[in-house]
Image (spheres, helix red, strand yellow):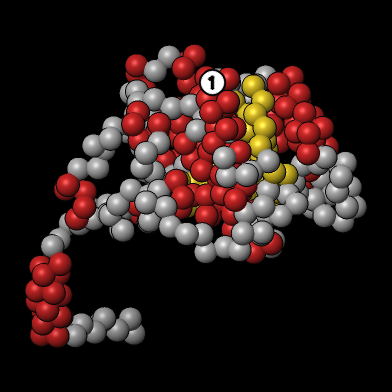
Amino acid sequence: MESESPFKSDILKGKVALLTGGGSGIGLEISTQFGKHGASVAIMGRRKSVLDSAVSYLQSFGIPAIGFQGDVRKQEDAKRVVELTVKQFGKLDILVNAAAGNFLVSPEDLSPNGFRTVLDIDSVGTFTMCHEALHYIKKGGPGRSSTSGGMILNISATLHYTAAWYQIHVAAAKAAVDAVTRNLALEWGTDYDIRVNGIAPGPIGDTAGMRKLGPEEISNKSKEYMPLYKLGEKYDIAMAALYLASDAGKYINGTIMAVDGGLWLSRPRHLPKDAVKELSRTVEKKSRNAPVGVPPSKL
């Protein structure tokens, strides 16, 4: 259930955003919220049918929206879509890299080719889009002032903070995306006044990711040790994106914001809560009664 936005409806007024993977799932929700808060929106995707229905959906809210077919793995597609976006809306302020590939597989059953495919879409694709957008998104780029650059947002994950079962390809790809985010934040922040940040979503309900990775993924047992035990909503990710893209986030650069309810921190309790009280009392008592040892004198 989507709540009403806590942000003013004009915080992205006059901004132009291009989103890869913007036609479905989390990407579409970010596109929608950016549009509802004043931005003009271009979305890029591989499937024309998905793009077309996403554009009509966005336009039904009165959002100026356009869709471009393209594959982030192809440099010429990236270049063409960035140029068409600027041709349509006059400039480019925000690039969101939300295109991603995923499937569950154990490392021994994953072909090097399958591994490469996910790295190509997530890591190389993210870099390729950034590379092609630089000319327009940097300070002094077409349609923008000589003092302020735009903003890049890369959708990541938390899988690689520790390790994740059956996700070696995605963990590797998202680790690379986070490295790209930090390096561009340093270099392009310094040279071009471009802010580059990431969002690492936890499990989000009603997305292809959750359907693929097992809708029953969270067993009841897990409830006992998961902070804020629940699935996130696409809305949660879009609100974080809005914050980072708006002036509220103007001093945030090189940050990867985990939006997962603290899930990646969770691990099974090794002791029930009431046992902890009992144990600490026993341990306290023991240490109070123990003789205080004085180390023998060296003299």
Is residue 287 in sight in this rendering?
yes
Residue drawn at the location 67% of the way across and 52% of the way down? 38
Quarter residue 147 falls in: bottom right
Q: Amino acid at mark 1?
A: Ser
Q: Is residue 244 above or below residue 67?
A: below
Identify the secondary structure beneath mark 1: helix
- Give the x, y percent position of residue 30: 55, 45
Residue drawn at the location 11% of the way across and 70% of the way down? 274
Quarter residue 11 falls in: bottom right
Residue drawn at the location 12% of the way across and 79% of the way down? 281
Is residue 194 in sight in this rendering?
no
Instruction: State left or right for residue 200 relative to residue 178.
Output: left
Instruction: State left or right for residue 107 relative to residue 169.
Output: left
Q: Which residue is mark 1?
A: 49
- Give the x, y percent position of residue 170: 46, 31
Instruction: State left or right for residue 287 relative to residue 227.
Output: left
